[in-house]
Structures are given as structure tokens and as C-alpha cells.
Image: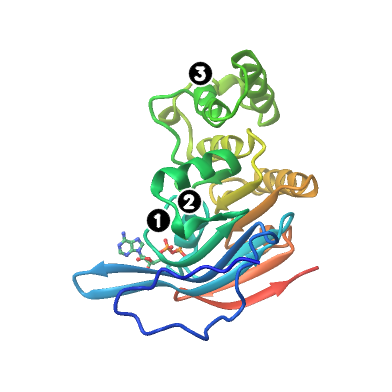
Amino acid sequence: MWTFRSKTAEGEPSQTGAVDAPIDLSRPLLGLRNIEKVYETPAGKNYVLRRITIDVQPGEFLTIMGPSGAGKSTLLSILGMLDGAWTGEYAFLHHPIHSLNNKERVAINKQYIGFVFQQYHLLDDLTVAENLDVPLSYRNVKRDERASIVADILDKFQMVGKKDLYPRQLSGGQQQLVGVARAVIAKPKLILADEPTGNLHSTQAKEIMELFQKLNEGGTTIVQVTHSETNAAFGHRIVNLKDGWVVSDVRLR
Ligand SMILES: Nc1ncnc2c1ncn2[C@@H]1O[C@H](COP(=O)(O)OP(=O)(O)O)[C@@H](O)[C@H]1O
Ligand SMILES: [Mg+2]
């Protein structure tokens, strides 16, 4: 079993005793200990995440819920290695993320994680097909094989006719679908999805949730943020955030 020292927030009172269990790097897919995120604003410190301590096992389908501003997107960005400005400990697989630099974190993101952004974040100057190719380009997949994987997913998402369009030529819902397709295309170990169906019709939303369910049954770990009870019911566990604190952590089945 490994333990490691926390990065300690400057000027923060000691958090010793808040959580005693050391992280076992061999067990959960990801383990968070006392994660804190603070924004410095002209009005003072804005605490966005408070002592977040969660383990996620391989194969879990976890939902993060909570009111707007609770810190859900911030937490997902940290899980996805997109944000390095926080304190505490984060173990992902056997990697101590809190000790890594930005480049090392990005490499882990590219290798293991598919991220669905709340605001889609497609690359504006790439077509739909080119956007979908990006995660494959990070892996050891040959070019012609990549083209056939992209063709398959376009078909699955019924977007073959949109493949040469640019994101600005798509509706919000269509961009969201491309965002989901991009997150799953390279079969990541972990899918992080920030309100992935927020701009979809209920039938499309159900299809995306069924896709996640199928991937999860195949072993993919999923952490989704949603306001939808219907979407949450697809997962196995709900963590509720409020004002940056975990206020409940409930297993559904
Ligand atoms: N760049 C920033 N500077 C200061 N505060 C921020 C910044 N980004 C987010 N916040 C604050 O962090 C809090 C949590 O935001 P967020 O994680 O987006 O919440 P949620 O996704 O739960 O709606 C909010 O109060 C928000 O105002
Ligand atoms: Mg959000």
C-alpha cells in the first residue's frame, strides 16, 4: 500500500484527521483525498471544492448531481486532468496525479479518458469527421483503420451526412452528439460526461444513456454530471455536491 503527502493549500488550516484512509493505488480506478479548489477573486477566496474524498472502482457508473454552481464541472475537470490547480491527493490507476506536471497529466488524459464537455468544445476548424479522428490520432491506430472507425461511429450516430460540416454548421444538439461520439470513439477506460444530454431530445438522450450503459456493461467506467433523474437512474451511484462539499454518496444497486 502506498501513501503520499498532500499538497497543502497555502494558509489553510491543517486537514489532518479529515480522512485517515491512505490511498491504495492498486485498487480503485481513481481515488481522491481532500481535494480542494480555490479561486482567488477580487472579493476574496472562493472555495469551489471542499475536502472531496471519493473512490471510484473500475466498472462503476457514477452520477454527480447538485445545484448550479455546486462545483460539478470543476470536479469533472480535475478528474479529467484538465485542471491542475488544486490541492489534495488524486490517484488514477497507479499514477499519483497530484505529483505530475501538466504534460504528464495531459498524456494520461489522452491515453485513458474520453471527456464530454458541457459546452461541446469541438475544434472549430476541423470537420465533424476530423474532430472524431482526433482521439484516435493519440492512439496507435493506423490511418485507414481510423477512417473506418470514424465511418462506423458516424453511422451509429446517424451523422454520415454531416461528416464534412464544421461545428458552426451544426445545431447545439448535433454538436453535443459529436462531442459524445468523440468521447467514446477510442474506447477509453474512463468516460467523463458533463451534462451530455443537456441539448438533446428525450429520445436522443435515452439513446446516449443506453450507449453509456452498454459501454459500462463492457467494463468502461463512467462518471456523468446530470440534472436528470432519468439519466441518473442509468448509473449505480449518486454523489451529491452542494457548495463544493459532498453532501451524500448513495449506491442505487
Ligand atoms: N474562473 C473562475 N473564477 C472564479 N470562480 C469560478 C471560475 N470558474 C468557476 N468558478 C466558480 O466555481 C463554482 C463552481 O462552478 P462549476 O464547477 O462550474 O459548477 P457547476 O458545474 O456545479 O454548475 C461557481 O461558483 C463558479 O462561479
Ligand atoms: Mg457545470
The circle drawn on residue 81 is: 2
Q: Is residue 59 visible?
A: yes
Q: In which quadrant will I find the N terminus?
A: bottom right
The circle drawn on residue 227 is: none
Q: Residue flagged by tag 2: what amino acid is it?
A: Met
- What residue is shown with label 1? 84
The answer to whether residue 224 is above or below residue 23 is: above
| Mark count | 3
Which residue is more in the foreground, 206 or 128? 128
Q: For residue 20, which quarter of the picture? A: bottom right
Residue displayed at 45% across by 57% down: 99
- What residue is shown with label 3? 164
Q: Are marks 1 and 3 in contact (CB under 8 Å)?
A: no
* 89 with respect to 214 (left or right): left
**In terms of secondary structure, where does tag 1 sit?**
loop
Question: How far from the left and from the top, in percent, is residue 40?
Answer: 26, 68
